Amino acid sequence: MSENPESVEGAEHPEVPAVPESAAPESAALESPAPAKKKRFPRRRVATLTGAVLLLGAVVGGTGYTVVTVQDADRDPGKPSWKFPKAAADQDAPKAKGLRGMLMPYEENGFAQGPDLDEFGADAELSGRQATALRKESLKGLPPADRRKLEKQLDRQHIKGVVMRSYLNNDRYAAYADKVSAVSVTLTQMESQAAVRNSSTSEIEFFEALGIMRKGPKIDGHKNATCFLSPKDKDEKIDWMFCSAYVGDVLVAVNASGVAPLDKEGISTFLAAQLDRIDDPGKAV
């Protein structure tokens, strides 16, 4: 976690030294934290906690972390800017099969290759053993008892494989209308459909328990998909959305971010197409 524990504790329970009665009036300001900082704290904490949950849900890294860094800067970053990735050279690459073939291909629905997902690049595939080991690695900062409990849960999931891909809707309309969005999609295949449902339910319960997330859009034709939007704040220039869904033995996690207000309709359409692709084996050869 990137949060400084001391600064967080200080924001909630500032330690105020005894102030003599003859002290200058301005010293009284120490007795109450600045309301602006307190207002922004929950959103920063949500971003931090979300990062941990997405990692445990196999959304490793993601497009949301880059934009969250901008909003926490000490200076006003001004209007967000987007650095478009270089287009890959055209080549007759063989069509992906299996779990990787279920991912939405680039250039469909107006989405091109997006930013790297940490050290994995923009398009990655992990074996079940690799994905499980990565998740367990992310638990190292937890208390031993909690860590062991979560590790046992991970072992019971019997992950078969994980694929990740990031996208960017960089068409001319999106750029002109400030509708540019970065989206990361993670598909996790498990041996048990019950484990997939339980994982999606756990992610949804986490965001509901925060108590400050906004309800996201519904995904047409997919009742097993639930989305959340970041807390509304007129001072924020970046919005983000997280969706958890499942189709059969595949858990789907989507993390999207963009210039506020976020293009929820475009992202919802993209997610519906992604879920349709998993649901129809003929679309993923």
Image (cartoon, rainbow, N blue to C red):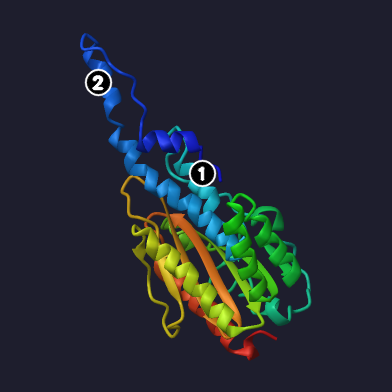
- Residue type indicated by callout 1: Thr
Query: As displayed, is residue 254 above or below residue 20?
Result: below
Query: Of the residues under marks 1 and 2, which one precedes in the sequence?
Result: 2
Q: Position of residue 196 (x, y in %)?
A: 57, 78
Q: Nearer the viewer, residue 47 or 179?
A: 47
The residue lying toward the viewer, choosing from 83 and 172, is 83
149 relative position to 209: left or right: right
- Horizontal side, residue 89 vs residue 38: left or right: right
Q: How would you rate the neighbour count of disc 1 (Cα within 10 Å): few for under 14, some for 14-19, many for 20 or more?
A: few
Tell me where residue 259 appears, x and y as whole percent. Answer: 43, 53
Would you say 12 lies left or right of 110 here?
A: left
- Residue type for callout 2: Ala
Q: How many marks?
A: 2
Q: Are marks 1 and 2 in contact (CB under 8 Å)?
A: no
Write down the quadrant of residue 282 in the picture: bottom right
Residue at point 72%, 62% (across, down)? 133
Decide: is 236 above or below 172: above
Work out whether residue 217 can be spotted. yes
Which residue is found at the position 60% from the left and 79% from the top? 250
Viewer can see residue 76: no
- Residue at figure coordinates x 24%, y 11% from the top left: 24
> How far from the left and from the top, in percent, is residue 187?
62, 73
Q: Which residue is mark 1?
A: 69
Q: Is residue 220 left or right of residue 121?
A: left
Q: Position of residue 9 (x, y in %)?
A: 42, 37
Mark pair 1, 2: CA separation? 32 Å
Q: Is residue 197 above or below residue 68?
A: below
**Residue designated by label 2:** 28
Q: Tag 1, which secondary structure?
A: helix
For the residue carrying disc 2, how many other residues have a C-alpha within 10 Å: few (<14), some (14-19), or many (20+)?
few
Q: Residue at x 38, y 62 (%)?
A: 209
Q: Quadrant of the C terminus?
A: bottom right
